Image: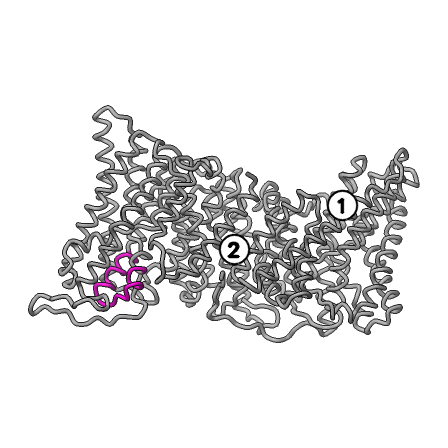
Amino acid sequence: MTGHGAAPAGFATRALQAGALVVLFGVGITASRLAPARPDATAALAAVGFLLLAGTLLSELLETIGLPHLTGYLLAGIVAGPHVLHVVDHVTVERLAPVNTLALALIAFAGGAELRVESIREVARGLAWATLVQTAGVLVALAAGFAALARFVPFTAGMSSSALLGVGLLWGVIAVSRSPSALLGILAQTRAKGPLARFSLAFVMSSDVVVVLLLAVVLMVARPLIQPGAALSTEDFAVLGHEILGSVSLGTTLGLVLAAYLRLVGKNLMLVLLALGFGMTEALRYVHFEPLLTFLTAGFVVQNLSGQGEKLLHGVERTSGVVFVVFFATAGAHLDLPLLRSLWPVALSLASLRVVATWGAARVASRLASDEPVVRRWGWSSLVSQAGLSLGVAMLIARTFPEFGQGFAALAVATVAINELVGPVLFKVALDRAGETSTAPEVSRPHASFDTA
Amino acid sequence: MSSTALLVVLLALAYIGSLVVGSRGQRGYGLTSGVEYLLVGVALGPHLLGLVDRDLARGFGPLAVVGLGWVGFGAGLEYGMSGRRRITARGAVVGVALGLVGVAFVGAAVWLSLLWLAGLGLATPPAREALLLAGGVGAVGAETARHVIRAVVERDRAEGRLTNLLADLAAADDVIPVLALTALYAFAPAGAADGLSLATRIGLELGLGVLLGLLLAALLGREPRLAESWGLLLGTCLLALGVASRLELSALAVAFFFGLSLAIGSRHRDDLRDMVTPTEQPVVLPLLLLAGASIDVRAAPYLVPAIAVGIVARVVVKLLAGAGVLLVSLRARAAGLRVGLGLLPSGAFGVAIGMSCYVALPGGVGETILAFSALSCVVGELLGPPAVRRTLVAAGEIAGAPPAASPPGRAEPPAAVTPEGGA
């Protein structure tokens, strides 16, 4: 197998991988025809194994035409999923939700640990301008765009113009959300270093916090616009304040404890991260704190308030390699292709508008901040990807406004699907063009050892 | 308890397991078979403290499948090797033969005892289930725990031909319980894949493992990289276990053949073993606890007599095996029949075979086999390691012990022993 930057694999290796992929699909299809999936968790075992293997092999094959690994994982999921070959069915896809939980926790840990104070200082000016311009620009552009395209959107039929404005603002929040997982996936593959990678990392990670805040504000503003009887309530702010402060406090504590553990014990980090990813997320949801923010803070604290950041990053990297493949392949299997087929004209228009708005906002912000040329030229490329966070926001909005929530969520899923497929490719191309992709060969491990200790 | 909570508990157990293995190693303290964890499981189970009830234990079922598969995979990967040393052809042949005799003898004894109990008018399982029960007990009874022999050898720094022979026998006989388990699963009442014939089911169990093992060996190629190796290894293994579960085949058997074919087909066998070995104990510890907590000695009226007969038959067949060893090893004669007791240890692999039967055969049959595997482990721990030690002392293969007096004119030459002479 080859990693990025390794010597390119020959024809024989690629042929072997293609053959293995065919065998793999043969095994999967035969098993699913011979016996239906059992209604217990053992059905998920085959699915995880299948997606892990198929994702890895397909990503290797697609690498030959310059596509990122992440695209391979997504495509493997789509092909194996319930809408194409049906090797992985709907129920099993739902059963794999814990993998998403774990992946998001690891993404947040890694994201926080990657945010070094000195790096943020270097891009602070650009980051501040980008946050301001991207948030305002994309929110306004997409809200207006949505309102303009409303006649093609079935669930907005009969809505008043103020309600359309409210729904448009909610759509704008979804458009502002980015994908930390896609960003980290691409950075892990390319091992890119440089101003573009640094800026993208700082911006996308911090944008999570912005989205959480923005969502609460927009929910508060949109409610009276959409529901005429509703009044502007500041209760959402109180709830939000509690959530954010609680998450940051708990994240700080967790970070300090984790730093102490890494310093004093340092063993079994993989098991500790797994237990935190599963157990702590559940506990945080129970107390209505935001897991992503908590783990992000914890990673940040470990990196910047202790000398254990590299250990944490190394541990997360080893755990996440496998988890990310399953996470993205599951996301691919989750894509509702029939829905995408029926909504693609509107979804494509909105996705295109978002790319244009993001590009325009990036140009303006870069000029205001006097960013380096490479950031000015390619800074927008990392902001196109969308994934779990965007879908999470869409589901929350759908629950909050059940009168149009189902249609809204469906359109969001279709749009995110497009961004999910296009975004990683764009960012990888940008990193390659910017010359930030690592070309150093990956260290070969003929004597690989697995350290649980 | 929610599935997440269960998972966290399991991870905590795995954490403790890896700490234990990290601190104790092969030469340190702790019982060689890991029977103490089995007993802790019994203590936590419904018979004593009641902290883990049977529903909770059953909730771990899918995770148990992963554990069983991982144990099977490790055993397959290591099969035919004793540490870094390939076992001798003689050891392999004798070990397999003794394993076959063990399955047949213990199984037959249990089956006859069930017939006898039925003749007395006591409740026994129907004929098909009685055969499955006898086969399952036989499969567990045939095994000799290679880790136990290895632990004794390493702790006492034993070296020599008899040491190697015992290690070889323990390493060679694992394939017999796995084959027996393959047949049992094929013969057992199936659900989802009920339409498949017996031969097809056996063929699938063997074929699936071999196909995926060779596929992985080809994919790992010449220069495996850590990240990809783990992704491919875990992916293939989970796929094998998942498909096996879906078709109601034995996860342990499929994983064993997967590991075996991978070891045969890949040039990185030693590297793979180095990757997998540290992960075995964290998996085994929760599995032993779970097995202990699942035991219910009141599950069937025939459970206690069947277990008693099985244990006695196992001791007898191991003594007979000892007699066989005396025929092929002159050094063993100094220890006499005691050498047979040295083949009595049973450990995590035996319990895993018992758990596999428990998963596949709900009701009294599976319960009896699981309980037998647990008791076999306890008896093996009590009698086995001391017998191995005394045998090797008598043979002069433990440092500081006087050399064995070989019969005149038939002295064996000193053995060329590797430092990792254990199993």
Q: Which disc is residue B375 wearing?
A: none
Is the N terminus of chain A in the top left, top right, bottom left or bottom right quadrant?
bottom right
Q: Amino acid at mark 2?
A: Gly
Question: B269 above or below B197?
Answer: below
SS of the residue under disc 1: helix
Displayed quadrant of residue A195: bottom right
**From the viewer's perspective, is residue B59 above or below residue B166?**
above
Picture quarter containing residue B419? bottom left
Q: Residue at x 66, y 47 (%)?
A: A284
Give the percent coordinates (x, y) of residue B53: 46, 36
Residue B346 shown in magenta: no
Give x and y (percent) for residue A75. 64, 55
- For label 1, count other residues whose C-alpha is less than 10 Å away and answer few (under 14), some (14-19) or many (20+): many
**Residue ranking furthest to the right:** A161
Give the residue at x 77% y 63%: A381
Type of amino acid at the residue the image marks with label 1:
Ala
Chain for numbered disc 2: B
Mark 2, secondary structure of its residue: helix
Q: Which residue is mark 2?
A: B235
Discs 2 and 1 share one subunit:
no
Residue at figure coordinates x 51%, y 50% from the top left: B12
Give me the chain letter of mark 1: A
Residue topped by disc 1: A394
Q: Position of residue B9 (x, y in %)?
A: 52, 46
Q: Which residues are magenta?
A: B151-172
What is the x, y in percent for residue B257? 39, 54
Q: Residues within 10 Å of mark 2 (few under 14, many from 20)?
A: many
Main SS class of the magenta portion in the image: helix
Q: Is residue A342 left or right of residue B71?
A: right
